Amino acid sequence: MLILTCPYCGVAADETELTPGGEAHLTREAPGSDDAAFEAYLFQRENPKGVHFERWRHSYGCGKWFHAARCTQTLQVYGTYPAQTSAPPQAICDKISGARPGWSWRLFG
Amino acid sequence: MSEIASVTALNGARYDGIVEVAEMPLQGMITLRGKLGAAPVKNAAIGIGGVDMPDDGMISVQGDRAIAWMSPDELLIFCAYDEVGVALTAMERTLDGSFAMAVDVSDARAMFRLEGAAVRDVLAKLTPADMSVQGCPPGRMRRTRLAQVAAAIWLTGETTAHIVCFRSVAPYVFGLLSTAAQPGSDVGYY
């Protein structure tokens, strides 16, 4: 069971109060992008055993979307942060580095 | 045209078990969305709610009036059911020109009250929310789910809990609460 703290309302919400929104920090390939980039945007997702960044929606609460950084192997939650960002905050990256030195995830790490 | 009198979803249904479950009478409820720090939004809320602005995640209650913090941009304001029309007009005047919206949701909601020493245990059977004294002290507005439907829960004391849910699921929620409150099903955890 996963408990994530919503960064907007501060509620420690159970997984069942949230709606999963898939991978975080995707870049939408705009019209004019090449087919390979658009295919990657649509279909190619990370499936790591370890550090992962996800989107979640606090659907049985304040209704806001947020991001979560967690480990898929140990279920450790490194932190949650608002969705209005294209990269995880430094504090969360530092926390991940403390728990898993040398981690990397897409462009981050 | 004859006037059709408003009724609650369950006509004031009651159940007596390890706690007393009661559907509340018609309650005026106004959803106010906007920037909660903005003066017109605060004034509109306080003018109708008649209580102080609640802190984040909390509810301020005074009699049948209250202001509940629902999300960073949403308040739920409680007032008398037959005052809602007048209240909305007054709020719209206060909000004039600001980026905010007030809507009457009284008839879209049902309200229940739980009374008894085991209210925390009864609710904890139905919700994943932390119902301990630290997790849900009186005055905290916890939006969560009861079994399969959304609900908002708050306590006004150690033996009184209030629940707001959608009116369309009122029979389901009443069934849930009654089942969780069946005699002999006391958990005694909290």
Image (cartoon, coloured by chain):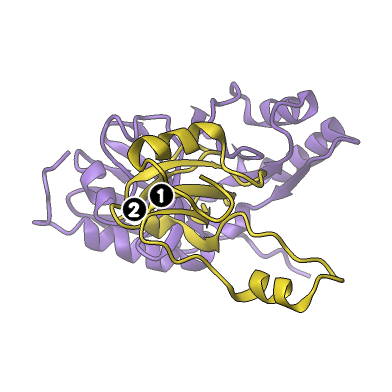
Estimate the x, y position of residue B2 in percent, counting from the top left.
74, 68
The spot of residue A69 in percent (x, y) is 46, 47
Instruction: Report x, y in % for residue B135.
Output: 32, 34
> Is A50 displayed left or right of A104 in the figure?
left
Residue type marked 1? Arg
Which colour denotes chain A? yellow
Which chain does purple denote in the image? B
* Residue B140 horizontal side relative to residue B132, left or right: right
SS at mark 2?
Answer: loop
Q: Is residue B160 above or below residue A39?
A: above
Q: Residue at x 27, y 57 (%)?
A: B15
The percent coordinates of residue B150 (x first, y second) are 46, 58
Discs 2/1, front: 1
Residue A27 located left or right of residue B148? right
User: In the rendered image, which quarter is residue B94 located in?
Assistant: top right
* Mark 1, residue position: A70
**Are the residues at dot 2 and dot 1 in contact (C-beta closer than 8 Å)?**
yes
Mark 2 vs mark 1, CA separation in Å: 10 Å
- Toward the right, the furthest residue is B97
